[in-house]
Amino acid sequence: METPVESTRERLLNVAEQRFGEGGYEGTSLRAITVAAAANIAAVNYHFGSKEALLRAAVSRAMAPVNTERRRRLDQLEASGRPTQEQLIRAFIEPGLELVMRRGERGAVVARFIGRIAFDPSQRIRELYAAESDPIEKRYLAALQAALPHATPEAVGFGYVNMLGLLALHQSQALSRPSGIAPGVTVAEDPGRLAEDLIAFLVAAFDRGLRP
């Protein structure tokens, strides 16, 4: 049975994910979070210590299943031989989009939160996100370089940053039609279809766009 202390902590984390995902770190006040979570500033200080520490805990919780699944897939690919760029891209993209498929409504909240924080205007906040994601992302970057020996490290890095950006775009939009898209242009809203479209696009970009 969940204790009241655990309940308060989880409420704060859940509301933080939603509010930070909608308004960003600077645009979200700690008071707005505590009011929505039916808590108070003292509860934040008790469980986390500060607003930034609350964000750090929310990022850690949100990224943990993604990092775990990406690590598992990469370990499996490397154990079976030299993975192709398509295998690596799929192993990286799918766990991020599966947030929505596996978690229902909360999945969209978490995906939007991750996408927003990953590209927050504040360098400090981006660094906080990177601390949770860098270890496994560096492994994927190295594996992509090995799978693309014809491309320079700078070119692979360029492609990799753009892969992160596209994934974050769809996460921040909660896998729905991006605002401002041209009339008549459609984007797949089904996470499975979106994953296949995004993977195919990225494979072509890496394969053709990074050739010397």
Image (tube, rainbow, N blue to C red):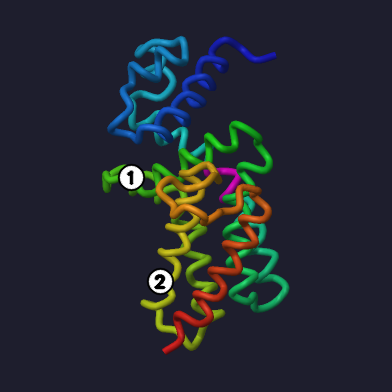
Q: Is residue 122 left or right of residue 75?
A: left
Chief secondary structure of the magenta portion: helix
Q: State the residue position of label 1.
A: 120
| Along the viewing direction, whichever of 106 and 73 lies nearer the viewer | 106
**In the image, residue 66 lies in the stretch drawn in magenta:** yes
Q: Position of residue 202 (x, y in %)?
A: 53, 69
- Against 156, residue 92 (above or below) is above
The residue positioned farthest toward the front in the image shown? 184
Q: Amino acid at mark 1?
A: Asp
Q: Is residue 75 left or right of residue 121?
A: right
**Alpha carbons under labels 2 and 1: distance apart:** 20 Å
| Along the viewing direction, whichever of 29 and 62 lies nearer the viewer | 29
Q: State the residue position of label 2.
A: 157
- Against 146, residue 5 (above or below) is above
In magenta, the rendered stretch is 63-67
Q: Position of residue 68 (x, y in %)?
A: 61, 50
Mark 2 and mark 1 lie on one chain; the one further toward the N terminus is 1
Identify which residue is drawn at 65% across, 64% down: 75
Identify which residue is drawn at 41% across, 43% down: 116
Q: Position of residue 27 (x, y in %)?
A: 30, 30
- Against 27, residue 95 (above or below) is below
Asked where in the image residue 147 lies, by quadrant, the reply is bottom right
